Image (cartoon, rainbow, N blue to C red):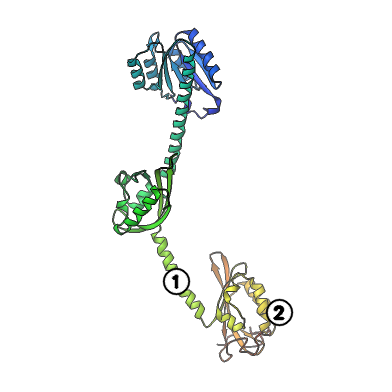
Amino acid sequence: MTDPLHRSDAVEDEGIRILHVDDDGAFTELVATFLERVDDAFSVRSETAAADALTALEVDDERVDCIVSDYDMPGTDGLTFLERVRDRGIEVPFVLFTGKGSEEIASEAIAAGATDYIQKEAGTDQYTVLANRVRNAVDQHRSKRALAASQERLSRFIEQSPLATIEYDESFEIVRVNPAAEAVTGYDADELVGGTWMPIVPEEERRRVAEVERHLLADRGGYRSVNDNVTRDGERIRCVWHNQVVTDDDGEVIRVFSQFEDVTEREARKRELERTNAVLSTIFATLPYGVLVETANRRVLAVNDRLYELFGIDGDPEDAVGRDCERFAADVSDRFADPDRFVDRTNAIVAGRRPVSNEVLTFVGGGTVRRTYRPIDLPQGDGHLWLYRATAGDGGGARDGGSANGGGGAVGENGAVGGGDDNGA
């Protein structure tokens, strides 16, 4: 039978229900009266036979928070009744309240699992004592249940967490290793539990990790760390550790939870990406082409110095990043022979997303550049790549063509702005 106190409808604000078992019916009525008077949270049910009490405990709609039982009862005794209660899986507090007092019985009662032992006495003070003992027993039981439930939830969270987790006690001894941590370290949990972190930390890192440990135990830091680790088969890995301390009411550290992940491949990819970006940045900056990259929503993603040189634009190309490309095209259109045709042609190319190669554009002063367009795929969606290069013999661009501020040009039938060969060099 399931412990009635553990049922989902056992809500603490319903008060405390007490089952009192004593073969003296008049006494049970007296006890009920005084207990309910002492504490208005109490609700007492009285039974004069242990068998009837067991039946009451087995009724599904009953909830009992504490059992108070006499010792001497017809056909049984309080300890036998306690045994039958526990055999049914009922773990609520059990207080032996009896007139048969002896140290031997008290000792047997506690050994058998009774929560408390109180000897009946004359006068009404005994009911106040009984009420206090019952209240304390129920409060402690509920606190233990709440703690157990919290620990169970924590245990399930740790066991099911995709993050590797190691739990340490107050002396930084490992008390738990979850499956994800086993997978990362290569160790079975029972190989690490009871030991320290030393098997998973290479020798040259141990002094630094020991310093992190000292900071954590003093609750002074070390909550995030990155260091090399070593797996059971000797493989070196790089891990990021996120450490959380748990303290008691006095501020003393009683637990440390360390969650970590293997970032070896991630860091390797990061280094490779940094190298690639460094190479691409160098190429981008030194290309003899003017380069402009647009995002799907036509924002400048990248532009190089050469484009500014060709168009005769002052300033830092990095300042253009994020600008609206239609506005950008309008701003530079006066470098060309027909500004409106330059803007319209640019917009049409973007809308069509069809490749264009070596389109000749003519500056106001007669100089020309060749433009190539390619639609590209970016992580955030469609993109647009433009390449501009000076035509051989035409110098550097808008300034060298005779106008620093430019004029306009139009795309002719042969693909040129202000004339020119679409297939020229």
**Coordinates of residue 144 in the picture (x, y in percent):** 44, 31
Q: Mark 1 vs mark 2: which is more N-terminal? A: 1
**Does residue 79 appear to the left or right of 136 in the view shown?**
left
Vertical side of 69 occupied by 314: above or below: below
* Residue at left offset 39%, top offset 51%: 215
Q: CA distance from mark 1 to mark 2?
A: 39 Å
**Coordinates of residue 424 in the picture (x, y in percent):** 57, 87
**Does residue 394 appear to the left or right of 202 in the view shown?**
right
Please tell me the numbered disc located at residue 84: none
Q: Are marks 1 and 2 in contact (CB under 8 Å)?
A: no
**Coordinates of residue 56 in the picture (x, y in percent):** 48, 17
Which residue is labeled 1 in the image?
276
* Residue at left offset 42%, top offset 40%: 155
* Residue at left offset 59%, top offset 80%: 308
Residue type at tag 1 = Thr
Residue type at tag 2 = Asp
Mark 2 lies on a secondary structure that is: helix
Closer to the eye: label 1 or 2: 1
**Does residue 169 appear to the left or right of 42 in the view shown?**
left
Q: Is residue 358 visible to us here? A: no
Which residue is labeled 2 in the image?
340
Q: Quadrant of residue 108?
A: top left
* Residue at left offset 40%, top offset 64%: 268
Q: Quadrant of residue 154?
A: top left
Give whichever of 113, 392 is nearer the camera.
Answer: 113
- Residue at the bottom extreme of this rendering: 393
Mark 1 lies on a secondary structure that is: helix
Give whichever of 225, 188 is nearer the camera.
Answer: 225
For the C terminus, the image quarter is bottom right
**Does residue 51 appear to the left or right of 39 in the view shown?**
left
